[in-house]
Amino acid sequence: GYLKVNARVADAIAAMIEPSDVLWIHDYHFLPLAALLRERGVKNRIGFFLHIPFPAASDVPALPQAEDLLHWVRAFDLFGVQTEADVQRVDALVARYHAEGPGQVRAFPIGIDVDQYMAAAEASTAGGRILCGKGQKICVGVDRLDYSKGLVHRFEGFKSYLERRDPEVDPKAIMVQVAPPSREDVEAYQDIRDALEQEAGRVNGAHADLDWTPIRYLHRMVPREELAGVLRRADVALVTPLADGMNLVAKEYVAAQDPEDPGVLILSHFAGAAEQLDEALLVNPYDAGEMGEAIRTALHMPLDGRRSRHSAMLARIREHDIHWWTRTYLEALGAN
């Protein structure tokens, strides 16, 4: 079915393409498309951008089309990926099979419209609707309900903070997790939802007080403008996927913050954004104890430390914003 869909798209493109056209193809859904277009005599420049991580060479044999993967990849003139680590994985696969690679492999870390998101965060009043008691701090997570996002692991890390918390020193923290539905007709995703709801119930049952509910879990869509306000209000953002090509929530959190009193970003080593945002507190999302300790560190971080980390990350996401990404990629694809 995968190849049939790609063949239909290739037929449609081949029938309408003009000699001066340049093609930019996105994501793993259309990996075979350039090879199929070449079979149909299309000689135009064709670029590709992979939004998810490229697999390690040792994992490729697990794919049902493993033998075809390099054939598909080398049909592109430009093979774009999110990180330098992805470039290395493409090169390692080419070397492993002593094969010819694509015309060019380059990292183009995708960005956001920083000014637009900052304006949305400043204008939003949603953050003020988060009820919390005096001295309580807010942690936030925003993710699709997807197994790759590590949401159950995140709740376990937050639980670790609560279990080790010293009531005399450490603040009462509230974890606001927004997790919109995703592929709810698939059994594996139903299992994730059940596990997440059970863990939230266990944590709240063990640690809640009359004036404090530690986990607030929203399993629904929240408008983008409201999310910007929630991110601005949060003292800590937990962006802890088990695997992620980039993760733009990390960049949105940085953009949403008040530069005079910014919060702290806790970021998974396995998010592509970690390659750019190394001033975040980087954690192993599989290690609940490490995540819990990072939450404690973030909640106690002095203002000077928060400002210096935030300013460095903000400068970087400004430099490599969505406009830089589009322009840089298309310039590279158009080069002869």
Image: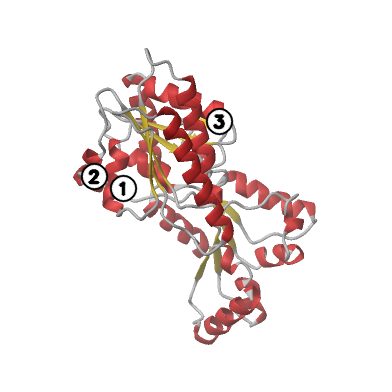
* Disc assigned to residue 126: 2
Dot 1 or dot 3: first in sequence order is 1
Q: Earlier in the sequence, mark 2 or mark 3?
A: 2
User: Which quadrant would residue 97 be assigned to in this image?
Assistant: bottom right
Question: What residue is pinned by disc 1?
Answer: 227
Nearest the viewer among 279 and 195 is: 195
Q: CA distance from mark 1 to mark 3?
A: 26 Å
- Label 2 neighbour load within 10 Å: few <14, some 14-19, many 20+: some
Q: Is residue 82 visible?
A: no
The amino acid type of the residue labelled 2 equals: Ala
Counting other residues with Cα less than 10 Å from the Cα at mark 3, is it few (<14), some (14-19), or many (20 or more)? many
The residue positioned 34% from the left and 27% from the top of the image is 209
**Mark 3: which amino acid?**
Ala
Dot 1 lies on which element?
Answer: helix
Contact check, label 1 and label 2, Cβ < 8 Å: yes
* Residue at 55 percent of width and 26 percent of height: 289
Quarter of image, res 69: bottom right
Question: 10 Å neighbourhood of mark 1: few (<14), some, or many (≥20)?
Answer: many
Q: What distance separates the C-alpha of mark 2 from that of mark 3?
A: 30 Å
For the image, the number of numbered tags is 3
**Image position of 37 with respect to 124: above or below:** below
Residue at 58%, 84% (x, y): give it.
11
**Residue 33 sits above or below residue 104 on the image:** below
Task: Name the residue tied to disc 3.
Answer: 288
